[in-house]
Amino acid sequence: MYKLAVIGDYDSIYGFAALGLDIYPTEDAKEADQTIKRLADIGYGVIYITEELASKVPETIRRYDEQMMPAIILIPGVKGNTGAGIQGVKDSVEKAVGSDILFGSE
Protein backbone atom coordinates (compact mmCIF):
# COMPACT_ATOMS: atom_id res chain seq x y z
CA MET A 1 0.00 0.00 0.00
CA TYR A 2 1.27 3.44 -0.88
CA LYS A 3 1.66 6.20 1.65
CA LEU A 4 -0.26 9.46 1.51
CA ALA A 5 1.12 12.86 2.50
CA VAL A 6 -0.18 16.40 2.79
CA ILE A 7 2.01 19.50 2.45
CA GLY A 8 0.92 23.05 3.25
CA ASP A 9 0.43 25.54 6.02
CA TYR A 10 -0.26 23.89 9.37
CA ASP A 11 -3.77 25.27 9.79
CA SER A 12 -4.83 23.83 6.43
CA ILE A 13 -3.37 20.34 6.86
CA TYR A 14 -3.34 19.37 10.55
CA GLY A 15 -6.75 17.66 10.31
CA PHE A 16 -5.42 15.16 7.79
CA ALA A 17 -3.27 13.58 10.49
CA ALA A 18 -6.47 12.32 12.17
CA LEU A 19 -7.22 10.46 8.94
CA GLY A 20 -3.86 8.72 9.02
CA LEU A 21 -2.08 10.84 6.42
CA ASP A 22 1.45 12.06 7.03
CA ILE A 23 1.56 15.85 7.28
CA TYR A 24 4.44 18.14 6.40
CA PRO A 25 3.63 21.68 7.48
CA THR A 26 5.47 24.41 5.63
CA GLU A 27 4.82 27.68 3.85
CA ASP A 28 8.33 27.90 2.40
CA ALA A 29 8.78 27.14 -1.32
CA LYS A 30 12.28 25.69 -0.98
CA GLU A 31 11.22 23.39 1.85
CA ALA A 32 8.12 22.31 -0.09
CA ASP A 33 10.25 21.52 -3.14
CA GLN A 34 12.66 19.42 -1.07
CA THR A 35 9.81 17.65 0.74
CA ILE A 36 8.06 16.70 -2.51
CA LYS A 37 11.30 15.32 -3.97
CA ARG A 38 12.07 13.36 -0.79
CA LEU A 39 8.56 11.90 -0.57
CA ALA A 40 8.65 10.91 -4.25
CA ASP A 41 12.05 9.26 -3.78
CA ILE A 42 10.86 7.14 -0.86
CA GLY A 43 7.76 5.93 -2.67
CA TYR A 44 4.77 8.01 -1.60
CA GLY A 45 1.87 7.33 -3.95
CA VAL A 46 -0.17 10.49 -3.40
CA ILE A 47 0.95 13.91 -2.23
CA TYR A 48 -1.72 16.49 -1.49
CA ILE A 49 -0.50 20.08 -1.50
CA THR A 50 -2.38 23.27 -0.78
CA GLU A 51 -3.09 25.39 -3.85
CA GLU A 52 -1.32 28.36 -2.34
CA LEU A 53 1.89 26.42 -1.70
CA ALA A 54 1.70 24.69 -5.09
CA SER A 55 1.66 28.12 -6.75
CA LYS A 56 5.11 28.71 -5.22
CA VAL A 57 6.60 25.52 -6.73
CA PRO A 58 5.04 25.17 -10.20
CA GLU A 59 8.16 23.65 -11.79
CA THR A 60 8.23 20.90 -9.18
CA ILE A 61 4.53 20.15 -9.70
CA ARG A 62 5.04 20.00 -13.50
CA ARG A 63 7.99 17.63 -13.10
CA TYR A 64 5.71 14.99 -11.61
CA ASP A 65 2.74 15.60 -13.95
CA GLU A 66 4.13 13.22 -16.54
CA GLN A 67 4.96 10.49 -14.03
CA MET A 68 2.63 7.82 -12.74
CA MET A 69 3.72 8.34 -9.14
CA PRO A 70 3.47 10.25 -7.04
CA ALA A 71 0.15 11.79 -7.94
CA ILE A 72 0.29 15.39 -6.76
CA ILE A 73 -3.17 16.73 -6.01
CA LEU A 74 -3.91 20.35 -5.21
CA ILE A 75 -6.33 21.06 -2.39
CA PRO A 76 -7.74 24.33 -1.09
CA GLY A 77 -6.29 25.75 2.11
CA VAL A 78 -7.90 27.67 4.93
CA LYS A 79 -7.31 30.91 3.04
CA GLY A 80 -9.65 29.80 0.27
CA ASN A 81 -9.86 28.09 -3.08
CA THR A 82 -7.99 29.48 -6.07
CA GLY A 83 -9.60 27.03 -8.50
CA ALA A 84 -6.22 25.53 -9.42
CA GLY A 85 -7.09 22.12 -8.01
CA ILE A 86 -10.37 21.86 -9.90
CA GLN A 87 -8.70 23.09 -13.09
CA GLY A 88 -6.00 20.43 -12.69
CA VAL A 89 -8.59 17.66 -12.41
CA LYS A 90 -10.49 19.08 -15.40
CA ASP A 91 -7.29 19.19 -17.48
CA SER A 92 -6.42 15.60 -16.52
CA VAL A 93 -9.86 14.32 -17.51
CA GLU A 94 -9.75 16.27 -20.76
CA LYS A 95 -6.32 14.82 -21.54
CA ALA A 96 -7.52 11.29 -20.76
CA VAL A 97 -10.77 11.35 -22.75
CA GLY A 98 -9.86 13.86 -25.43
CA SER A 99 -12.49 16.50 -24.67
CA ASP A 100 -13.99 18.56 -21.92
CA ILE A 101 -16.67 16.28 -20.50
CA LEU A 102 -18.50 19.18 -18.86
CA PHE A 103 -18.77 21.49 -21.86
CA GLY A 104 -17.99 19.30 -24.89
CA SER A 105 -15.02 19.74 -27.19
CA GLU A 106 -14.13 23.24 -28.19
Image (cartoon, rainbow, N blue to C red):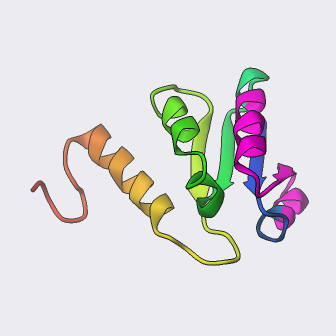
Q: Where is residue 9 in the image (x, y as percent from the top left)?
A: 78, 63
Compared to 41, does 15 lie above or below?
A: below
Q: In which quadrant of the rendered view does residue 27 lie?
A: bottom right
- Comparing 17 with 30, the one in front is 30
Q: Is residue 46 left or right of residue 18?
A: left
The magenta region covers 14-39
Give the residue drawn at x 50%, y 59%: 85
- Comparing 52 with 92, the one in front is 52
Q: Position of residue 90 (x, y in %)?
A: 36, 55
Compared to 99, does 42 lie above or below?
A: above
Q: In which quadrant of the rendered view does residue 36 lie?
A: top right
Regarding residue 1, the answer to whether it shows in the image is no
- Comparing 22 with 12, the one in front is 12
| Residue 27 belongs to magenta span | yes
Give the residue drawn at x 79%, y 23%: 42
Regarding residue 100, the answer to whether it shows in the image is yes
Give the residue drawn at x 84%, y 64%: 10
Q: Is residue 15 left or right of residue 80?
A: right
Q: Quadrant of the C terminus?
A: bottom left
Prevailing secondary structure class for the magenta stretch in the rendered image? helix
Q: Position of residue 101 (x, y in %)?
A: 24, 57
| Residue 23 belongs to magenta span | yes
